[in-house]
């Protein structure tokens, strides 16, 4: 049995949802697809899918087998690329997961520069405001802002992520400017649905403070909160990688400079150092060099 082709057939059937669709995509006959699946199940020693005329679903064994088949196919592709390209030039595909805010504010420009340098690389950006399973969702690299990462993953710190408390001049003219962090509890604060929804954390004069906040607008990503702040809806705590331009233009004003919001690490996260594709290693090195330890977007704000 050609096990690699059997794995490719299995993954394609799962991704497309049916054997007939997989047969069309792979330019095989339906009986050939069925034979590959049966032979793969014989090799694994377990049934991988429940197949009916209307529905296809993975068995427990199939759920275990699927991510491993994806890894095997990716490794095979990496091997072919390495043999065909003795100069080790980065090429192939990368799937990168990133939050909407950092993706739009910073990563898109970085990726555009990278593919300009290495036109043999194709990058698929997944803008997702949730934590993804890298194996199940076939993500090569995730950019995550956190000080508490999954210990089963490999993380490379890229830079620091700072935040700023800010508001539009229109809001401050109407509601006043808070002078102490405790006063935020009396203001309309625009909150993130997942991070700091009801408590904002600060360091003031070496002391850690948690201030309860509330407001009439909440969102699951920071770009929306910035638009609401620019419209004068309230006070927001936003990452400086996103707000730097608005702060420099005076569209948003920084508040409470004596209070330092909690800093987080900006990390590049991946599954394993073993058999790391040259393209992934190249992208990691590029991002680490571009963002560095002290981000340039924080200068002048």
Image (tube, helix red, strand yellow):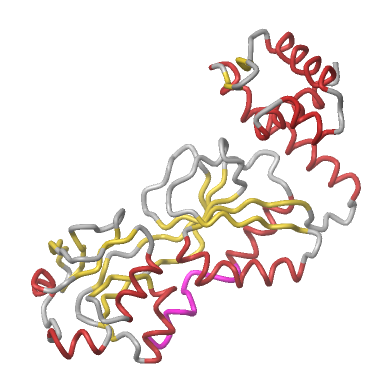
Residue range of the region highlighted in magenta in the rendering? 289-301
User: Percent position (x, y) of residue 165?
Assistant: 26, 75
Residue 175: say if magenta: no
Q: Which quadrant is home to the N terminus?
A: top right
Q: Nearer the viewer, residue 48 or 19?
A: 19
Q: Nearer the viewer, residue 5 or 284?
A: 5
Please say if 111 is above or below 65.
below
Rendering coords of residue 64 (x, y %): 57, 22
Q: Is residue 216 above or below residue 180?
A: above
State the image quarter where residue 8 is shown: top right
Q: Residue furthest front?
A: 54
Residue 296 colored magenta?
Answer: yes
Image x and y of residue 291, in percent: 54, 70
Q: Is residue 156 left or right of residue 242?
A: right
Location of the C terminus by quadrant is bottom left
Q: Residue at x 61, y 21 (%)?
A: 54
């Amino acid at each position: 049995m050609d096990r690699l082709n059997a794995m490719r057939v299995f993954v394609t059937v799962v991704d497309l949802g049916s054997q007939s669709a997989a047969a069309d995509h792979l330019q095989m006959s339906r009986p050939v697809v069925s034979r590959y699946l049966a032979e793969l199940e014989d090799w694994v020693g377990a049934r991988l899918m429940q197949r009916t005329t209307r529905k296809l679903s993975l068995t427990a064994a199939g759920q275990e087998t699927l991510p491993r088949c994806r890894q095997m196919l990716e490794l095979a592709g990496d091997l072919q690329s390495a043999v065909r390209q003795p100069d080790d030039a980065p090429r192939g595909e990368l799937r990168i997961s990133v939050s909407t805010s950092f993706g739009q504010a910073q990563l898109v420009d970085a990726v555009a520069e990278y593919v300009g340098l290495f036109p043999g690389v194709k990058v698929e950006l997944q803008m997702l405001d949730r934590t993804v399973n890298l194996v199940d969702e076939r993500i090569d690299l995730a950019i995550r802002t956190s000080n508490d990462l999954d210990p089963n993953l490999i993380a490379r710190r890229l830079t620091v992520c700072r935040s700023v408390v800010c508001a539009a001049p229109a809001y401050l003219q109407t509601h006043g400017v808070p002078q102490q962090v405790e006063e935020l509890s009396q203001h309309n604060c625009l909150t993130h649905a997942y991070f700091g929804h009801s408590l904002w954390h600060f360091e003031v004069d070496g002391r850690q403070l948690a201030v309860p906040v509330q407001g009439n607008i909440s969102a699951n990503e920071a770009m929306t909160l910035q638009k609401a702040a620019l419209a004068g809806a309230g006070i927001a705590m936003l990452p400086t990688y996103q707000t730097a331009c608005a702060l420099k233009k005076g569209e948003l004003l920084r508040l409470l400079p004596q209070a330092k919001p909690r800093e987080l690490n900006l990390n590049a996260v991946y599954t394993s150092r073993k058999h790391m594709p040259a393209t992934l290693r190249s992208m990691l090195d590029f991002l680490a060099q571009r963002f560095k330890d002290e981000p340039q977007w924080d200068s002048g704000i």
